[in-house]
Structure formats: structure tokens, C-alpha cells
Image (spheres, grey):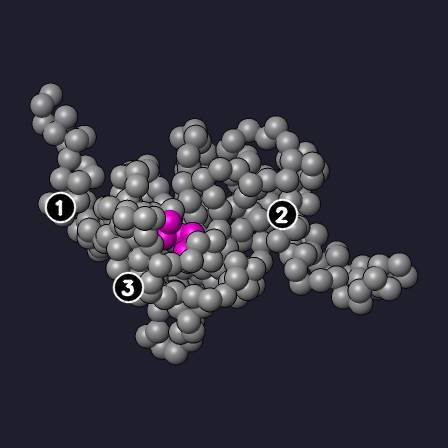
Amino acid sequence: MSEGTPLLGVADLSVRFGGVHALDSVTLDFSGGEICGLIGPNGAGKTTLLDVITGIRPPSSGRVTFDGVDITGLSVTARARRGLARTFQRQQLFGWLSVEDNVMTALEWRGGGGGLAADLLRLPTRARRESARRARVAEVLGLCGIADLARASAAGLPLGKARMVELARAVIDAPRVLLLDEPTSGLEPQEVESMGDTIRHVRSETGCAVVLIEHDVGFVMQLSDRIVALELGSVLAQGTPEEVRDDEAVVDAYFGTARRGDEAE
């Protein structure tokens, strides 16, 4: 990536469902090392934007670039292997696997080295690679505060712990862009604080760009370097948390109800 080139970008991005514009000519850039929060009411297009970036949903028009290269036509898998990692609103854990093995799945695409023969013969190279991966998993579980759950079944984990497993799986392979969709949904205040600390640490450790969808306005304002406000599929405002919080259009569209309620008291 050349100096000054955004790590991730979308240009004139539109998604139409019949006559409805889920996204309408959205153009945004995201730089390595920044945490960018996406806010907006339900139906603003936030999750649709992440779906297009990760290749889950094709755009009706526009393009997605990564590292200066157009990736609009690439598959979900190809984008993930370039360094795009994501969590989802709904839990996406493999309940029949342990926490450790859930996180390990994100490394399986790299292969074990040597193919089936190496498995059957238990070659030293395969054993060393497996050991290195287990060590990396342990490191990331520790980072996410769930090292004690490594051997526990993922089935039935409390919501806060399950979300930390999802985060661990997303960051295990050192992503260049980390996309988080409502990571604090359903968490207790202490868990929200822990999630914020972990996201900051991951950003510091990897230098990745973090794009964060959140309805917890206090959390996203405190955590983010930049805020993008969406409404009805369009960019309403963007800037520092302070600039967006004080933007009149954002106040009317997003904070208006709460603020009018405060003023009435």
C-alpha cells in the first residue's frame, strides 16, 4: 500500500432491494490503525455496508477497494485471506467444538503442511506447526480474557464469553481490517469495558483498521477515532466523535428523541 492510500475504501456504493435503497452512493475510506464507528438508526444500512465489504452481498453498483486493489468481484473467502475479518450480530460459534478449537478454525485455511501423508506419518514439521498454532491460540485467548475457557465447550457459553470467543477467532490471524457488528450487544457493563480494552489492544498490536457498528453511543464515542453517521443508506455526517455528536443533522436524526426527552425533564 503506497503512502496516503486508504487501506479500505468503498466508492459510489449502492444496494437496492426493489425500489428501496439500502445503500445510496456511499463513498468512504478507512485507514490502518484507526477505529471508525458506524452509527445510525435501524435500517440505516450499517450491516449492509459490512456485508458488501466482506463479499456476503454484491453491490448494485460501486466498488470496494483493499490495499488499492479493486476486490468487488472477490469471494468472501478470498477477502478473508487478504486480511478482512468480521464478527456478526448473531453468535456464529461451533457449539460442538471447544473454545480453543473454535478459534483454531480461523487458521485451518493455511493448511498443516505436507498433506495427508504428514498427518498419517506424524511428521515433525506438522507437529511443530500445530504446536505453534496452539501457542498463538493461547496467546489470543489470554488477550481476550478467556484463557481459562480454552478446553470448555462453546455450547452454552454466557453471551459475554461467547462474544469474546468470536473476537478471538476474528483476530487470531492478525487481520488488517477488523469489522465488528454490535460486539457489545447483550453484554454487562464490565464486559463492555473489557471488550473496549481488547479492541484497543488488538488495534495497537496489529495496526489494523477497526470498523465498528454500535448502538451503544457512549461506547462507540469513547472508543472511536472517527464516527460515520448513516441514515436511510446515505452518509449523514462524519468526523471526530465531538464533531458528529454536535452535528445538527445527526442530532435531529439520531440523538433527537433522547435529547428532546432530556430537555423536557
Q: Earlier in the sequence, mark 1 or mark 3?
A: 3
Q: Is residue 82 above or below residue 47?
A: below
The residue pinned by badge 2 equals 103
Q: Amino acid at mark 1?
A: Ala
The residue pinned by badge 3 equals 12
Q: Decide: few, some or many residues near mark 3? Use Cα within 10 Å; few <14, some 14-19, many ≥20.
A: some
Q: Give the left or right position of residue 66, taking residue 127 as reference.
A: left
Q: Amino acid at mark 2?
A: Val
- Please identify the quadrant where the N terminus is shown: bottom left
Quarter residue 124 falls in: bottom right
- Please identify the quadrant where the C terminus is shown: top left
Q: Decide: few, some or many residues near mark 1? Use Cα within 10 Å; few <14, some 14-19, many ≥20.
A: some
Q: Please tell me which residue lies in front, 81 or 231.
A: 231
Q: Give the left or right position of residue 147, taking residue 50 as reference.
A: right
Residue 230 placement (x, y as % from top left): 25, 48
Residue 59 placement (x, y as % from top left): 38, 58
The residue pinned by badge 1 equals 249
Q: Which residues are magenta?
A: 48-52
- Asked if residue 94 lies in the magenta stretch, the reply is no
Q: Amino acid at mark 3?
A: Asp
Q: Earlier in the sequence, mark 1 or mark 2?
A: 2
Residues under labels 1 and 3: Cα distance?
22 Å
Quarter residue 63 falls in: bottom left
Circle 1/circle 2 CB separation < 8 Å = no
Secondary structure under badge 3?
A: strand
Q: Is residue 37 above or below residue 187?
A: below
Q: Residue at x 54, y 43 (%)?
A: 166
Depth check, mark 3 against mark 2: the one in front is 3
Q: Earlier in the sequence, mark 3 or mark 2?
A: 3
Q: Residue at x 13, y 46 (%)?
A: 249
Q: Residue at x 64, y 40 (%)?
A: 94
Q: Looking at the image, which residue sits at the far top?
A: 265
